[in-house]
Image: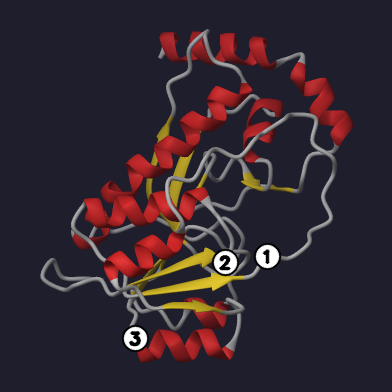
Amino acid sequence: MLSPKKNLNIALFSYNFPHRKTIDFIDQIYMHGYSISLILAAEAIKIKSPKSFFNFQSKPIKRDIHFYIKKHSIPYYVVKHNSQKTINLLLKYSINFSIISGARILDKSIIENIQYGVLNFHPAILPHIRGLDSLLWSIYKNKPLGVTVHLINHEIDSGYLVCQKKIIISLKDDIYSLKEKIYQLQLDLLPISLNLILKNKKFSKLEKGQYNSKMEYGTQKKLASSILEYIQTQIKHEQEN
């Protein structure tokens, strides 16, 4: 593990298209006194996905990523994340730590080339809710909503738990405000997680829960009518505990 005096030489795994989380992560990293030594950006690919019942619209992006690349002089490469080129770049820039702001499943060969690990922010409570559409599956399975920050391994949404926190739910919430609260919690936990990494905390291994695929349209439609009940149940549970 790290000593407190050792610097993190950070690579950011991201996408090569406008991406809110990447921009906000860059802001958070620099705001809290860290820097990025390399950005590895993957091109968009077409993914077959069920139609969504909910209208989750993308929030505005503050600035184009090239503003940040220029401002902070960050080397930026468009690559396939799971490639020899990525490994070569990790070695070239002496990367010893990485953060995921946008990536698909990283191969074991990539993870093993990053000495202190790859940090991921999963928008749900692991190990209960693994995989895709985590907000919807959390509601469907009546599980708390929150964020899990973990050092990944070769298994999906697994590895070592760095920190975990639930969002605060109110009767004013709907599915869209819940999604935004989870997003903002990821940003809040970024500097906290980096601080824990630097303090050499020992991280426990996550148990392996059931993996969830994208939720089908019909299931989403049925779920819509139970969101208020879910919110009321979660608030009651928090009050009792």
Q: Residue at x 43, y 51 (%)?
A: 63
Question: Amino acid type of disc 1?
Answer: Ala
Q: In the shown orientation, is residue 3 left or right of residue 227?
A: left
Q: Position of residue 96 (x, y in %)?
A: 32, 78
Q: Do the CB atoms of the residues marked 3 and 1 lie less than 8 Å apart?
A: no
The residue located at (60%, 85%) in the rendering is: 83
Disc 3 crowd rating (10 Å Cα; few below 14, some 14-19, many 20+) is some
User: Where, quadrant-wise, is the N terminus in this rendering?
Assistant: bottom left
Q: What's the mark number on residue 93? A: 3
Q: Quick one: SS at disc 3?
A: loop
- Real-space Cα distance between discs 1 and 2? 7 Å
Residue located at (38% from left, 78% from top): 75
Q: What is the C-alpha distance between the residues marked 2 and 3? A: 20 Å
Identify the mark nearer the N-term, 2 or 3. Answer: 2
- Which of discs 3 and 1 lies nearer the camera? The answer is 1
Q: Label 2: which residue?
A: 16
Position of 199 compared to 81: left or right?
left
> Which residue corresponds to mark 1?
44
**Secondary structure at numbered mark 1:** loop
Percent of width and height locating residue 165: 40, 35
